[in-house]
Image (spheres, rainbow, N blue to C red):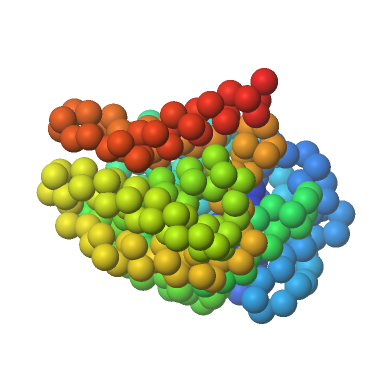
Amino acid sequence: MQISIVGAGAMGSLFGGLLAESGNEVTLIDVNDAHIGAIRAKGLRLATDSGDRQVTALKALRPEEAADLPDLLLVFTKTLHTSAALSGVRHLIGPGVHVLSLQNGLGNVEKIAEFASPERILIGVTTWPADMVGPGHVHSHGKGVVRLMAADGVDRPFVAEVSEVLTRAGLDCTSDGTVWAAIWEKVAFNAALNSICAVSGCTVDELGKVPDGSRLANDVVTEVLSVALRMGIDVDPAKCRANVASAIAQHIGHKPSMLQDILAGRRTEVESINGAVVAAAGRLSIKLPVTETLLSLVRLAEVRAIA
């Protein structure tokens, strides 16, 4: 499959490297010139539980340099950059191109629908961890899964094809018509781990060093999923709490993207995760004291980081 990945940060590069290793034609598209240059010079250094190696069978381009229309355009930018990123690759979104979002947070389908027709949009979630060590160098330790579906809920053959391609790359993907529940569970997962790590400076596994870390994370999961349940979305709080516990136990040394952004002096995705949940809760007159407090703390940390 010809796959272009918009947003070749840690997650985009991990997926791109694994997809290239399994025989797909992969193009990483990003505006990070140092990262692109390092990949062009030596390939992508990818360190996973399977080993540390250089992946050279892929391209790395700026948006204006990309010309070949892919079968699949995989979006991994932060939600706050989605519209700008897709504007930059509008010329790649032809009538036969499908767009898959595996982004964090809420509101991604609505942004993508400005560029692609609904029947060509796929939506999904992933629990794979990834960290950018430096330009051209990404590592991922621990396991994850991918779940996806057509955004309009129609069971189309291309959805199963993408799922098979991702699974062959070792990304353990399933086609799942209940992805909206999974999206809310992932939002809860990220609202907990990302925001706590962002304000504490802890890696995910360090949250397990004292009971407070796991307790805070579980409180956030309970609050976030109470909103989804009120909206009639069939989420599974017990499963989500188990996923959080598994991440704390297995994602050794992993710095979630929100913490990486704070450390790098960048804006975070907190508004599309904690912020979007708090806004939805407000419309339903639901109080989320822990989630809202973490939202305020991340906002403060973000302002200080980018000052």
> At 27% across and 52% down in the image, what residue appears?
222
Instruction: Give the residue at the far right of this rendering.
Output: 41
Task: Single out the residue that lies furthest toward the top.
Answer: 307
Image coordinates for residue 75, horizontal then vertical, percent? 50, 47
Would you place residue 79 above or below residue 194 in this image?
above
User: Which quadrant: the C terminus?
Assistant: top right
Image location of residue 250, percent across then percent down:
54, 71
Is residue 158 at all visible to an observer of this figure?
no
| Residue 66: quarter of image | top right
Q: In the picture provided, is 37 more to the left or to the right than 265?
A: right
Instruction: Where is residue 264? Give x, y as percent.
Output: 69, 37
| Residue drawn where x is 67% and y is 39% of the image | 263
Q: Nearer the viewer, residue 96 or 18?
A: 18
> Which residue is found at the position 35% from the left and 56% from the top?
218
Along the horizontal axis of the image, is 233 left or right of 173? Answer: left
Q: Nearer the viewer, residue 73 or 17?
A: 17
Question: To which quarter of the image does residue 146 belong?
Answer: bottom left
Q: Compared to 77, does 240 lie above or below?
A: below
92 versus 87 height, above or below:
below
Quadrant including the N terminus: bottom right
Residue under the image location 57 percent in, 30 percent down: 301
Task: Estimate the x, y position of residue 32 in percent, counting from the top left.
Answer: 72, 39
Residue 77 or residue 59, whichever sits in front: 77
Residue 236 seen by the camera: yes
Tally of numbered discs: 0
